[in-house]
Amino acid sequence: MSPHEPFPAYAEVPRNWGPGPVEDIHWGGAIMWVGGDALMAVLAIVVIAQWVRSSDRTQDLGAWLESARRATVGPGLHEDVSLDEDNEALHAYNTMLARLARDAGECRRGRAL
């Protein structure tokens, strides 16, 4: 996007063919930009197509996400506690906040967690 040569040595090289130094740099940048985006798009399409075609449905992200949510919001909760139930979720969230406040207070006092 620069209107002048970013490196003075480019202007010093005699050129009797092709575009000028600035235009040459602009075209090179455009080719790299478009080419890089095209390669990433092809790679993304290949990965998504393989994921969709995958016959192995045992790697469900839903169970993993739920376990990550339970580990963050409500460590030590029983499996029968529903974090989607408003009152239970509120209680689990408040417990998590109390634990974080307690841990932060211990850190301020110089104690290890």
Image: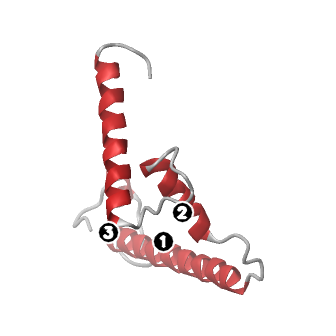
| Distance Cα–Cα, label 1 vs label 3 | 16 Å
- Residue under pointer 3: 22
* Residue 45 against residue 80 in the figure, above or below: below
Q: CA distance from mark 2 to mark 1?
A: 37 Å
Compared with 106, 74 (above or below) is below
Amino acid at the residue labelled 3: Val
Circle 3 or circle 2, nearest the eye: 2
**Residue for point 38% across, 50% down:** 92
Q: Marks 3 and 2, Cα distance to the nearest angstrom?
A: 50 Å
Which tag, 3 or 2, sits closer to the chain's start? 3
Mark 2 falls on what kind of element? Answer: helix
Secondary element type, mark 3: helix
User: Quadrant of the rendered structure where residue 110 is?
Assistant: top left
> Which quarter shows the C terminus?
top left
In the shown orientation, is residue 54 left or right of residue 7? right
Q: Secondary structure at mark 1?
A: helix
Q: Residue at x 54, y 60 (%)?
A: 80
Q: Name the spot of residue 46 as percent of width and height, x first.
A: 66, 81
Cβ atoms at labels 1 and 3 below 8 Å apart:
no
Q: Which residue is mark 2?
A: 65
Mark 3 nearby-residue class (10 Å; few <14, some 14–19, many ≥20): some
Q: What number is the disc on residue 32?
A: 1
- In terms of image quadrants, where is residue 50? bottom right
Vertical relation: 82 (above or below) 39: above
Mark 2 residue type = Leu
Residue farthest along the right direction in this orientation? 55
- Residue 26 placement (x, y as % from top left): 35, 72
